Image (cartoon, grey):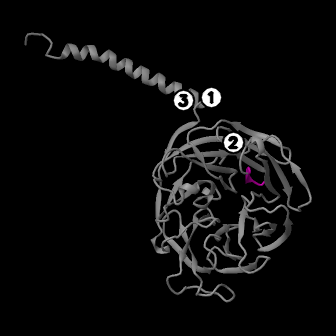
Amino acid sequence: STGRPRPGAAGLMSWLPLRANARRVSLWASLFFLLMAALGVFPLNGVTLGPVREVDLSSLGQGITPPLPHLLQFVNDSTLAVGLVVYNAGTPKLVRRGEASERSAFFLHTALVDASTGRVLRWAEWPTESLRHSGLVATPGSKLVVLLGDRVALYSDSLELMRRLKLPGPKGSVWLPSASPSGRSVLFVRASGRKPSTWAWVDANRLRVVHVWSVVPPQPQALPISDDYITFARCHPAGGRLPCRLIVRQLDGNSVQAVAGISYSYGSPEFVADNLLFALGWPHGGISILGLPKHRVLFRGSRGPGQVFGSAVSAPDAARFVVPALDRGPGLDYLYVFDGPSARLRTLRIRGVSSLAWPWWFAVSSSWLALSPDGRLLAVMENFKTVLIFRLPPPEGH
């Protein structure tokens, strides 16, 4: 051996300090981003979630179009109810006395699915006369409330019929439902063109009408509710006067108040808990979370990743709610996760949802997205063919 360095050794020796410096730069950059995330400058928490389970919906048939009520509902922490409205191509398997006949144009096909295994536990179908106004409405205490046009039915967690209710009004009336975050209350709104609207407040646990109002001016859409309040916005678009004025009416219908302290400029803020309102500004506004009845602001901040935000879904047993967000394309990209009384925010990236069931109707995102009561499982319907199950980080304090 001559003792001389082998060819290329000098270049290697000169490259090692550069590699060490690159590692230092990478380390400092990582520490910088962690610090910024802790300070709230970058709201993305650096966690990416993929689905832990896929549920094939082919046994339910081909869904025609999503109804306004939910397509997905957790009846308990591990059992998911999935519903699709399909065209009547055959004889129904389950037809009960007093319900629509087998000659109905459409059927609501519903399955109970074990979210941990993806196995279908039970299956049923119900005839309905309404395509867009049939679906799963609420899940109070491991029971399932189903809307079939102008008829409402309460089923057990084994899909056994417990009670029926005919909503007030002429046969064939169109009702728009809105359920409270707990699922214990449902407000049905019947629009009649220029005539006064009818509001029917229903106790979902017992499936009975608690209050009925005739409302002027007509209200053509469902309204966000809790177990205590109804909320709606009075907008004055002339001259671009925004934001709207938020009005809250109590359950008894007698007490009405204007609400201050929440920032929004379109639609109506949503109830994400019995006394908690969530709102988004438009087009460049922030996020507001307000506690009632004291109008106490719990959270106010700017938006993070994502360009279009959908409706929130709540976990009634865990003080948690999530808001889905689209970035580019038809898939789900991010979840805003709010935990606890302090409304702590975490932003999670979602992987695997390439095509939502109804992406251009994203504001009604609660139709294709559900959160388990304990806040640990998220179900997303993908293109009417598959339900994807995601496992979320535990709620804060649990």
Disc on the earlier residue, 2 or 3: 3
Residue 340 lies left or right of residue 359; in this view the side is right
Q: Where does label 2 land, which residue? A: 281
Does residue 44 sit above or below 368 in this rendering? above
The local secondary structure at tag 3 comes to helix
Report x, y in % for residue 62.
48, 72
Image: 384 above or below 41: below
From the top left corner, tell me how far across and down residue 12 is, in percent: 23, 17
Viewer-closest of 173 and 167: 173
Q: CA distance from mark 2 to mark 3?
A: 28 Å
Please report the residue visible at 84 percent of the width from the left and 46 percent of the height from the top.
259
Q: Nearer the viewer, residue 35 or 229?
A: 229
Q: Residue furthest left?
A: 1
Relative to 142, 210 lies left or right: right
Label of residue 39 in the image? 1
* Foreground residue among 59 and 17: 59
